[in-house]
Image (cartoon, rainbow, N blue to C red):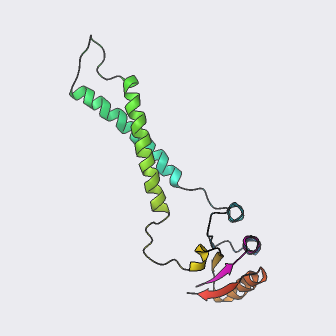
């Protein structure tokens, strides 16, 4: 159960979020038609875990690039003038290219995994107006706290406030 509020103005939305945070209500979802740095600053989202996907994918890609080059050289050796068959210097190009490729692919995979795309179920608290210029706040709340949240949202100029299960 929760409360959904629709705002027409960005400043009113930011003020409502700040007021909710002052009341120690931090569990909320904010919907915006476009990304806005004002809302991002007031919400203070955690750092994205996608960067871990990039790091691990890049490391695995570099290791695979070096491994496949060394394995290929050992399996089909080309002995030229007594030089070493497997050296790391020429294999750096292959390691780098696979690091970039696997790192990029794992970044895209991490983005889809963390954003839960495709979304099969409807999001609680979402309203079609939030894609057409309105800002929205959904606050999960218990029945005893719902009245306080609703009053706070209305006080800051919410155009529409409704309870949603």
Quarter of the image for residue 98 reads top left
Q: How many marks?
A: 0
Which residue is situated farthest in the left direction here?
Answer: 76
Q: Position of residue 2 (x, y in %)?
A: 61, 83
Magenta segment: 1-16
Q: Could you tell me which residue is drawn at 75 percent across and 84 percent down?
A: 154
Relative to residue 101, is residue 16 drawn left or right? right
Residue 90 shows in the view: yes
Decide if residue 125 is in sight here.
no
Q: Looking at the image, which residue is at 64% across and 88% down?
A: 162
Looking at the image, is 55 positioned above or below residue 125? above
Residue 53, position as x, y percentages in the image:
47, 51
Q: Is residue 7 magenta?
A: yes
Q: Residue at x 31, y 23 (%)?
A: 86
Q: Is residue 144 magenta?
A: no
Residue 87 drawn at (x, y percent): 35, 22
- Most distant residue in the top direction: 81
Q: Quadrant of residue 58?
A: top left
- Residue 78 in percent (x, y) is at 23, 20
Give the quadrant of the C terminus: bottom right
Query: Which corner quadrant holds the N terminus?
Result: bottom right
Residue occupying the far front of the picture:
132
């Amino acid at each position: 159960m929760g409360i959904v509020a629709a705002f027409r103005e960005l400043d009113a939305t930011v003020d409502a979020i700040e007021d909710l945070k002052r009341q120690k209500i931090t569990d909320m979802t904010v919907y915006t038609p476009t990304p806005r740095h004002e809302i991002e600053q007031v919400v203070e989202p955690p750092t994205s875990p996608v960067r871990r996907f990039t790091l691990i994918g890049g490391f695995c890609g570099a290791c695979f690039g070096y491994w496949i080059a060394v394995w290929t050289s050992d399996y089909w050796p080309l002995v030229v003038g007594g030089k070493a068959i497997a050296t790391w210097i020429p294999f750096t190009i292959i390691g780098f290219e696979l690091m970039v490729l696997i790192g990029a692919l794992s970044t895209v995979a991490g983005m889809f995994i963390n954003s839960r795309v495709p979304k099969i179920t409807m999001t609680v608290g979402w309203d079609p107006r939030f894609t057409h210029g309105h800002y929205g706040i959904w606050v999960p709340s218990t029945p005893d706290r719902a009245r306080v949240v609703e009053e706070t949202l209305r006080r800051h100029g919410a155009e529409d406030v409704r309870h949603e299960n």
